[in-house]
Amino acid sequence: MPHINIAGLPGGFLTTFSSLRLVASGLAVRRGPRFLFRGLDMSLASGQVMQLTGPNGSGKSTLIRLLAGFSPPDAGTVRLEGAGEEYPGAFLHYFGHREGLRPALTARENLAFLAGLLGGDEARIPDALGKLGVARLLDLPVRVLSEGQRRRVALARLLVVDRPIWLLDEPLASLDVEAIATVSGLVAEHAKAGGMALVATHQPLAATNATLDLSGRREAAA
Amino acid sequence: MSAFSAVLKRDLRLARRAGAGASLGLMFFLVLIAIVPFAIGADQKLISRLAPALLWIAALLATLLGLDRLFQADEEDGALDQFLLSGGSLTMLVLAKALAHWLVTGLPLSLAAPVLGLMLAIEPQAMLPLSLSLLVGTPALTLIGLVGAALTVSLNRGGLLLSLLVVPTAIPTLIFGVAVAKAAAEGRDFAMPLTVLCGTTLFALAISPIAAALALRQARG
Amino acid sequence: MTDQTSGSLLRLANPAVFNRLADRLIAPFAVLTLLLFVWGLYGAFFVSPPDYQQGETIRIMFIHVPSAWMAMFVYAGMSLSALGTLIWRHPMADVAQKCAAPLGAGFTLLCLVTGSLWGKPMWGTWWEWDARMTSVLVMFLIYIGVIALQQAIEEPNRAARAVAILTLVGAVNLPIIKFSVDWWSTLHQPASVFRMDGPTIHGSMLGPLFIMGIAFLMLYITLLMLFMRAEVMNRRAERLELLAAEAD
């Protein structure tokens, strides 16, 4: 996938990805004898920040991983409209429980790896860390960082690599109030520039303009 | 920096940070060779005849050692997820990991083998061909192991299972690798087995990364 | 909390004292080591006569034998440090242990290589599985194991205790290993009956050998202090890194 530098595009993502929509129809996932959810329809469009809610075990993480294309659903489809035939994986950021950082490497090295892997710009790493308030952790090995610091370093990749769709699974865990506000602001900025985000979180997210609730969807198999 | 070189660079960097821990394969190789005479007895002539075979078996086992962790560490820290999102070919990324593994395991083994061969009183004229056979054959071992590692990535006791899966497929490589060294030791021409050995490696190169990428995708959940 | 603080104060005090001591001693010790080596090697090459059986190659003995002594001496030292770590929790014991291991492995490797070079003219091969060389090889493997374990465990305290236990287990094992290797080698009489230290050690060889022994000892002490000082500084740097990250 070509590296898209948002700074170089007039209007950011807006012009390039405004027609992008992540659409899921009839999604179903089984867990043993039960369905976690069935017949789930949703769509995520440019400018939307959708908050995914539901009690623990309701399938939020599973749904996000389905949308990311990591595993196939037991029924239903996930499509990316407006992007031709390309695999949606190249258009999204996935942020999950496992942060993707190696303790032995520094913050810079970890992010440089992700930049190379996902098509980002290494030069933006210091700024990205700065926006998340962890600029001075740049060359410290990740193993000496606290949980909240690691999280913020891991989130920095959202700013180093430009991708229109953000799928974030509990990104605010371990973060203090200030950091939560920062991340919320970044998500809002992203949506304003034409991107979209699906965020699974228990905490209220200021930038939310749509919701998807998974509670009460669990049912026994027919 | 392309995705391939990002993966390669990271793996090599991690190996360097691990310090001597990265040369565990090499040390295991040394240990295996060192215990051979204790089992066989200090029979110089017998050990010398068995040297090519012993070195190859030790190389095979030493290569298998770290293979079960090849993808597990990436699975655990979430990097494997990111591999799938790279938009590039997963096959190429898997190949990058194989290259990194070989550079850290197979290559040092191949270079150290002649020195250890001295301890087993290998024939001098067999030293270079032995090293050559390992240089050509150890990539095949890494590549074959790659598929096993991908298949067992989510298993806890994957190491033993992986060995079970990999060793039968590695038999042709073993046969021709030893044949090269033995032929050289006995003063015969070793071009034929060496050519076939190249063939097995190229075959593994063509098939394994694709198979491993497929296995990794299937293992997602 | 206070236990931790006063413990860490104790930690800081001792290494700093050690480092100051090391700063003063390293240079003069290094000079002394150099002088001893010059003296010893002169004696080895010019004073001591060639052996009636082995000729000039006997001179390798002056490197081979002291390095064997050092291999064993260093392991003994490591065992003492191990006790220091486990029983008295002396703060510098694990630093000593960590730094001694590569040095001991180096001496062992030197012993193996010089043994091989010395044996080649006699044995006809580069290696002979005789009891003594094989025991040294096993000792080398044990050193490698200690170093590998040290590197594998990230947390320094846990690493120190694990390595200490491994060292002591190795120490207990070494006599057993030596015994079994000796027994094993009697099963097959080697073709050559040359013993590694020659049929007799001539009196005039003893002098230079003794000097070389002291020279090797001084080399070890100098290098050990150098490594330990570096390790102390490394740990300080790591602590500063941790503090830098915490200062949020």
Image (spheres, rainbow, N blue to C red):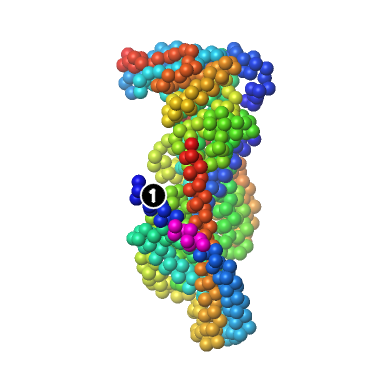
- Quadrant position of residue A6: top right
State the residue position of label 1: C5
In magenta stretch: residue B130: no
Nearer to us in this view, C11 or C198: C11
Please identify the quadrant where the N terminus of chain B is shown.
Answer: top right
Q: Locate residue C167 relative to residue A83 in the image: left or right.
A: left
Find the magenta span and give its range.
C13-20
Point 52% across, 68% down: residue:
C220
Please identify the quadrant where the C terminus of chain B is shown.
Answer: top left
Q: Amino acid at mark 1?
A: Thr
> Numbered disc 1: what chain?
C
Location of residue B36 with respect to B57 vertically, above or below: below
| Residue B179 percent across, percent down from the top left | 56, 54
Point 52% across, 84% down: residue:
C206
| Residue A157 percent across, percent down from the top left | 55, 30
User: How many numbered marks have been drawn onto this rendered protein structure?
Assistant: 1
| Residue C170 percent across, percent down from the top left | 39, 63
Location of residue A25 with respect to C139 vertically, above or below: above
Say if residue A19 shows up in the picture: yes
Nearer to us in this view, C32 or B69: C32
Q: Locate residue C56 relative to residue C67 in the image: left or right.
A: right
| Predominant secondary structure, magenta span | helix
Identify the element where label 1 is drawn: helix
| Residue C162 percent across, percent down from the top left | 39, 55
Q: Locate residue A176 relative to residue A129 in the image: left or right.
A: left
Location of residue A176 with respect to C157 vertically, above or below: above
Point 62% across, 53% down: residue:
B132
